[in-house]
Amino acid sequence: MKKSLPGAAIFAAVMALATTVARADTLPVPAVTIYPGDVVGEEMLADRQYPDGTAGRFPVVAARVEVVGKVARRTLLAGRAIPSNAVAEPDLVTRGNAVRAVFGDGGLSIETVVMPLQNGALGALVQARNTDTGRVVVGTAALRDPDLLDRLLAEHGPAAVVVSVDARGGQVSLAGWTESSGVDVADAVGELTGRGVERFLFTPIEVDGTMAGPNLPELIRVAGATEASVIASGGVGELAHLTRLAAEAPANVEGVIVGRALYEGRFTVAEGIEALR
């Protein structure tokens, strides 16, 4: 029995080692140096074992599927674990290269050609200029990112930049209408005018899509806070709404956006234009 103890101890040690190896993390690492801008391919990768739980404790790529086909954002050294934020989806659109943009809402479909103002991957929000109108529409980023607005105004000129302002209860809404900024919409428009904005697109959220009529009092209040041009949006459901806008809206309200009423056949584009004369 005494001679069997060392054998049992060796067997237990071997089993423990085997268990440790089996539970190690096998992570993909570069087989060669990968440089910024390179698209990562299978042939560029090798496997390397790390202590168990490494992928859970550190923000590193845990499987090849997470990195193959993506673009390196910085230099990836051979044999080193790949940080999760060191790769990104490849750009689908690139700044300055025209692409076709499609907007769909119910039975309405609009297609046009736009010029991206920045690179963008799948799922990214990209600013673009409409090549037909020459205009760039920017939303609440104009409030959240003053540098972005200043850059757009400098690059494209105030006449080409439209700032879209959405409001609920008289206050500017953010994040796809899910947050209130606590800023009065007329005050915001006045401030943005002072920064050089010459055209606004104003949407009172309460009436958007209702076809119950535009919020004319709020439109008048917002238009009165600026010398810039204002485009009204939301609520138009019949020709009478357009006739009233033409009669009562301030002189700096230069146009109106109509969506649902058109694709539901309430009236035609020609009839709408005539109602505004």
Image: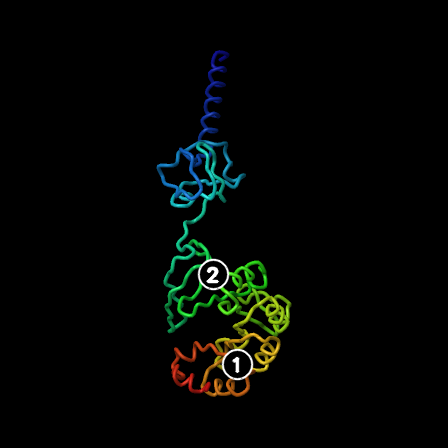
Residue 127: which numbered mark, if any?
2
Disc 2, disc 1: CB below 8 Å? no
* Residue 86, above or below 145: above
Total residue callouts = 2
On screen, residue 176 versus residue 29, left or right, reads right
Query: Of 118 and 212, which appears nearest the observer?
Result: 118
**Of callouts 2 and 1, the N-terminal one:** 2
Task: Estimate how packed mark 2 is, as few (under 14), some (14 to 19) or many (20 or more) residues with alpha carbons within 10 Å.
Answer: some
Say which amino acid is labelled 1. Pro
How far from the left and from the top, in percent, is residue 137?
Answer: 49, 67
Residue 214: which numbered mark, if any?
1
How far from the left and from the top, in percent, is residue 178?
Answer: 56, 65
How far from the left and from the top, in percent, is residue 115?
Answer: 41, 61
* Residue 153, above or below 248: above
Residue ID at (59%, 79%): 218
Query: Of 2 and 270, which appears nearest the observer?
Result: 270
Q: Quadrant of residue 47?
A: top left
How far from the left and from the top, in percent, is residue 52?
Answer: 50, 34
**Dot 1: element:** loop
Residue ID at (40%, 79%): 262
